Amino acid sequence: MSEASDRIDQLIAETTDWRGATLAAVRTAILAADPAIVEEWKWMGSPVWSLDGMIAVGDAHKAKVKLTFAHGAQLADPDRLFNAGFEGNARRVIDYLEGDPVRADELTALVRTAIVHNQTKLKKNVKGKS
């Protein structure tokens, strides 16, 4: 396990209300998408999940758990998980409020879509440099 994974474990353990359980469920769904996903710890205490580029950042705020997808605006979201962040042209957000279910299968599918987006973007960048 990496230092970042240990720090995420600690964050979840220290967040003893519903937000910790929600963040743990979000993390499980994200990691289920691909065994190569890397956990990172950035920006003074935010869990970040990456594979061939950033996928998402998770944060436990006072009244919600926020999951921000770095390239969410470019992702198909047939299950309509995104519920915030529509004002920008890059990121999209899933805000989980107390009592909101983490739709794990749909979230895992969205993460897989983000990974394909990252890999496609990576291939285009490599081709452009040839």
Image (tube, grey):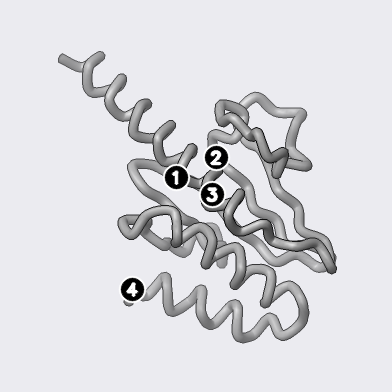
Indicate the secondary structure of the residue bearing disc 2: loop
Residue underneath mark 3: 56
Of residues 56 and 115, which is closer to you in this image?
Answer: 115
Q: Which residue is mark 2?
A: 70
Q: Earlier in the sequence, mark 4 or mark 3?
A: 4
> Distance of mark 1 from mark 2, alpha carbons?
6 Å
Disc 1 + disc 2, Cβ < 8 Å: yes
At 84% from the left and 67% from the top, the residue drawn is 98
Q: Amino acid at mark 1?
A: Met
Find out whether the residues at labels 4 and 3 contact each other: C-beta distance under 8 Å.
no
Between disc 1 and disc 2, whose residue precedes? 1
Q: Element type at marker 4? A: loop
For the residues labelled 3 and 1, the Cα–Cα distance comes to 6 Å
Q: Quadrant of the C terminus?
A: top left
Secondary structure beneath dot 3 equals strand
Of 107 and 38, nearer the camera is 107
Query: What residue is shown at x 77% (from left), y 81% (from top)?
Result: 17
Q: Nearer the viewer, residue 42 or 57?
A: 57
- Residue 55, position in %: x, y? 48, 46
Please, what is the three-letter code of the amino acid marked with disc 3?
A: Ala
Amino acid tagged 2: Ala
The residue to which callout 1 is attached is: 54
